[in-house]
Amino acid sequence: MEIKNISETKLTSLQKLNLPNDILNTESEILIFDSKDKWSKNKKVFKKLYINEGETFSNKLYTINEEIDKKEEINMEELIFADKLVSIKGQIAGFTMPYIENINFKTFLSSNEFTVKEKLARLKEVGEILEKLKKVRKYTSVSNIYINDLHTSNFILNTKTSKINVVDTDSFKIGNNMASSSKYLSQRSPIFAISKYKQNPNPIGGIYEINENTELFCYIVMIFDYIFKDKITDLKISDYYMYLEYLSHLGVSNELLDKFALIYLGQDNENPYEYIEQLEEYYGRTSNLAFKAARKRFFY
């Protein structure tokens, strides 16, 4: 991978990327600078890593290099990969990525400027991205690529293309790298006791073996973040299935509920993206508050 050298003077002149207050970034400082490539100028994001040595850093470099090497074969414009490493005083300090005018997906989902229909359509688009990745695994030599840390803050709505992009791709599972920690894949999650989510702890914080089951679990939790308006993983498994029964009473289709039901069962998870737009009809009644109220009236 190409390495871009910048001086400490240049570093101090770079502006920080303004992130929404509720978007956490714990592993890097994110800066913006203008980049010139022959006659064209464009903006770049510089992720200056807080850890630039040791096992975590080596794993990060492996991940980035693997993605750059396989970028053409992966061939997914939705994935925003790193393009150059950045060196300061001879020490690799991080990497650059294309800068994209965007709305963070978490902000988009919580905004009153967009309709429920628009938001569910974008959530469906995330599922379509997962289907594309599945085809990459099946039809190319890149057989072990997954979105490890899949949650709303790691997606953006590209305001130029009006499409969903995946950022934080340096936390992907790819090749022989070690899985980093993941927001929804914790020891406190109910999946800790489910055998199909195999535990494989490593020195950089990953707990589970990353595969299609973990990826789809995170996607379904992400959907519930929006419709349940609370942490679905805080529910006991028995209460989760009671909530699915409540959705059935509302009229949500069995095709969708059957896929939601799989996350705590022994069978492999399935992608529910084809059915989630139907939730528009029931959205005002899918929250945890509505469920609690209905539970008092109709459930035990």
Image (spheres, helix red, strand yellow):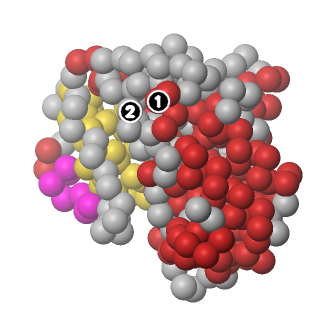
The residue range painted magenta reads 10-16
Tally of numbered tags: 2
Could you tell me which secondary element the residue under label 1 belongs to?
Answer: helix
Which quadrant of the structure image shows residue 195?
top right
Q: Which mark is residue 187?
A: 2
Disc with the residue nearer the chain's start (2 vs 1): 2
Tell me which residue sits at (63%, 59%) in the image.
243
Tell me which residue sits at (65%, 77%) in the image.
285
Residue with the mark numbered 1: 192
List x then y, in percent, for residue 77: 68, 47
**Residue 287 shows up from this direction:** no
Tell me the amino acid under the disc marked 2. Answer: Gln
Q: Estimate the spatial distance between the alpha carbons at disc 2 and disc 1, rounded to whole Å.
A: 6 Å
Q: Is residue 14 magenta?
A: yes
Please state if 160 lies on the left or on the right of 135 as rendered.
Answer: left
List x then y, in percent, for residue 62: 43, 20
Tell me the amino acid under the disc marked 1. Answer: Phe
Vertical position of residue 84 compared to residue 292: above or below: above
Q: Are marks 2 and 1 in contact (CB under 8 Å)?
A: yes
List x then y, in percent, for residue 98: 49, 51
